[in-house]
Amino acid sequence: MKALIRHPVLSLLVGIATGILIFAGRAQAPVEFATAVPLHDKGVSTYYVEGKINGLGDVEFLVDTGAGHTTINEETLAVLMERELASYSRELSGILADGSRMRVPVYHITSIELGGCQFQNIEAAVFPGRTRFLLGMNALKQAAPFAIVTEPEPQLALSNCRMAGF
C-alpha cells in the first residue's frame, strides 16, 4: 500500500505535470507523486539522495539523470559479492562526462531503497577505487514518472514505488 504524501510543492507539480509530461508523443493523465525523498544540494546544482543498498546499508547517491546506469565502486562490489547479493551481468563500454571511453563490468544488485521506495534487480556499473555512487536512469525508471523539485526544498518525487522491506 502506498502512503500518499500531501505536499504543496508536489500538488503544484502534479498540476504542472498535466500540461508538460509527454510520453511516446502523447500527453498523459495527471501524475500522482506518492513519495518525496529529500535531496541535498552540495553546490553547483548537484543533488544527492540518501539511500540504502541491500547488504551494505546507508549510502549517498549523486542523482544523475544523464547517466544510463547506476554506479557503485569496487569496494562496494566486494562486500556485496561476499554476501552473495550481486551477480555478474556483462561488460559495458561507456562515454564519461569528460568525453573519454571506459569499459566497466556491470553487476546485478538485489535492491536499492530511497525514502521507503525499493528498486529491485538493478544493473550497476562498477567503477574503480572508492568512486561515488550514481543513481542513474535505469533505477529511476522503476518509479517513473518522477520529478526533481528544486524549490522550496529540493526533493526527488517518485510515482510508482514498491515499499521497501529490508
Image (spheres, helix red, strand yellow):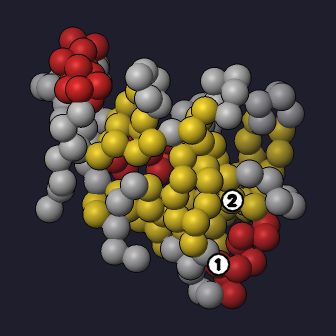
Badge 2 marks a residue whose secondary structure is strand
Q: Which of the image's four quarters has the N terminus?
A: bottom left
Badge 1 marks a residue whose secondary structure is helix
Towards the viewer: 151 or 108: 151
Q: Residue furthest bottom?
A: 83
Residue 29 rendering spot, x and y as whole percentages:
13, 25
Quadrant of the rendered structure where residue 55 is? bottom right
Q: Which residue is mark 2?
A: 72
Quadrant of the rendered structure where residue 126 is? bottom right
Q: Residue furthest top?
A: 19
Residue at image x 71%, y 72%? Answer: 77
* Residue type, numbered disc 1: Leu
Q: Which of the image's four quarters has the C terminus?
A: bottom left
Q: CA distance from mark 2 to mark 1?
A: 11 Å
Q: Viewed as shown, does residue 14 lie left or right of 68?
A: left
Q: Which residue is mark 1?
A: 80
Mark 2 Cα-neighbour bin, 10 Å: few <14, some 14–19, many ≥20:
many
Label 2–label 1 contact, CB within 8 A: yes
Towards the viewer: 140 or 10: 10
| Figure check: 161 above or below 112 | above
Q: Which is nearer the N-term, disc 2 or disc 1? A: 2
Residue 101 rendering spot, x and y as whole percentages:
83, 38
Q: Viewed as shown, does residue 20 lie left or right of 126?
A: left
Mark 1 Cα-neighbour bin, 10 Å: few <14, some 14–19, many ≥20:
some
* Residue type, numbered disc 2: Ile
| Figure check: 80 above or below 14 | below
Towards the viewer: 53 or 150: 150
